Image (cartoon, rainbow, N blue to C red):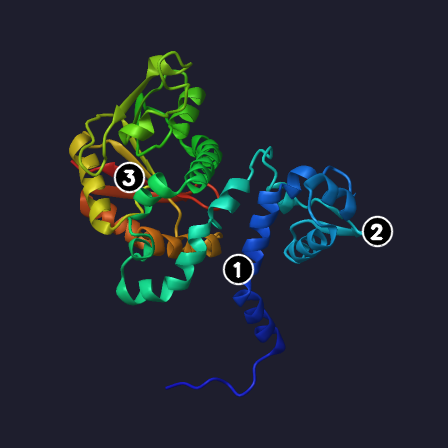
Amino acid sequence: MTTAPAHTSPQAAMRLRELVFGAACAAAVRAAARLGVADALGDTPTAVTDLAAALDTEPRQLRRLLRALTCYGIFAETGDDSFEHTEMSRLLREDAPNSLRYISLWCTEPWTWEAWPKLDEAVRSGRNVFPELFGKEFFDYLHSEGGDSAKVFDKAMTTSSRQSARDFADYLDLTGVDSVVDIGGGQGHVLASLLEKHPALHGTLLDLPRVVAGADPRLRDGGSFSARARLVPGDCRVDIPVRADLYIIKNILEWDDESTRRTLANVVKAARPGARVVVVENLVDNSPSMRFTTAMDLMLMLNVGGAKHSEESMVRLMEEAGLTVTEVCPVNPYLHAFEATVRG
């Protein structure tokens, strides 16, 4: 049995104090996003009184909120009781090209504050705690009782998907590929990005019926890519009735391992030997974004009982399914692509 050292450094104690108050930082980011502080702040320093008037808030309380956020590099104080944007605060603007406003709101939705204190129970039991808290599985609750939270979720996922779709389209080499299927591809932002970049490419979007019904307008009848796009409603864990040169599975293998195995087995069953398969995931190792991805991993443990993968666990599941993994490549600081082919 080890014992704690008799003395600890002031820096260690201060850092731990800061971490246990992490909820205050998350709440401050949420408050700024809900109030629209970043949208109201222009390109030049603005006095707190003027900003408060524009936002219909109390100047003293707004000053306290901004002071807390400046400690994390979100907004900066310039003197004369004024504040200005920083690189991070601009990401809270709704019109920012890489806006994180809805991601910030989604990660701090009301249900999260009830779920996080149950993390120790999830660790002990190995089960997600959401049904015990809310009487329903996560997505059933979200789409039946979630209200504004469901809208925030949809906007957050759309924003995130659009941003990563551009990075993935730039990463992907489609030499020799005539047809592609995006499995569980949501609204089809990845597929649309690929069809836009490769005018001869044909693609299929496979997802649940209600998801496909809201696909990117460019993929639907009358859309600019409709002649080269096919929308297939279905559940990839049940069947993948599509044959293509390339199968893309991006950010959906976060369920239990059995569901992941079924999805990968369905790909192998549908594809011809030698077909290319690219799995794209956030990893909890070998990534510069580990603080972010491990936090997402814990949230998945709480709300759906899922998990983010390590490189080793993802390769193992893919190899078990009948795929040969040839390389693992970074797409951006948050995503890695597992390149594989279907064994003959």
Q: Is residue 309 visible?
A: no
What percent of the width, then of the height, locates residue 11?
61, 73
The total of numbered circles placed on residues is 3
What percent of the width, then of the height, locates residue 113?
45, 56
Q: CA distance from mark 1 to mark 3?
A: 40 Å
Q: CA distance from mark 1 to mark 2?
A: 29 Å
Quadrant containing the C terminus in the rendered view: top left
What percent of the width, then of the height, locates residue 92?
60, 42
Q: Tell me which numbered mark, 1 or 3, is placed earlier along the sequence.
A: 1
Residue carrying label 3: 340
Identify the element where label 1 is drawn: helix
Q: Tell me which numbered mark, 1 or 2, is placed earlier along the sequence.
A: 1
**Left or right position of 344 against 205:** left
Residue carrying label 1: 23
What residue is at 29 percent from the left and 52 percent from the top? 135
Q: Tell me which numbered mark, 2 or 3, is placed earlier along the sequence.
A: 2
User: Callout 2: 10 Å neighbours few (<14), some, many (20+)?
Assistant: few
Identify the element where label 3 is drawn: strand
Q: Observer-nearest residue: 308 or 48? A: 48
Query: What type is the residue that disc 2 sits on?
Result: Asp
**Left or right position of 234 against 148:** left
Quarter assignment of residue 192? top left
Residue carrying label 2: 80
231 relative to 172, above or below:
above
User: Callout 1: 10 Å neighbours few (<14), some, many (20+)?
Assistant: few
Residues marked 2 and 3 touching at CB (< 8 Å) = no
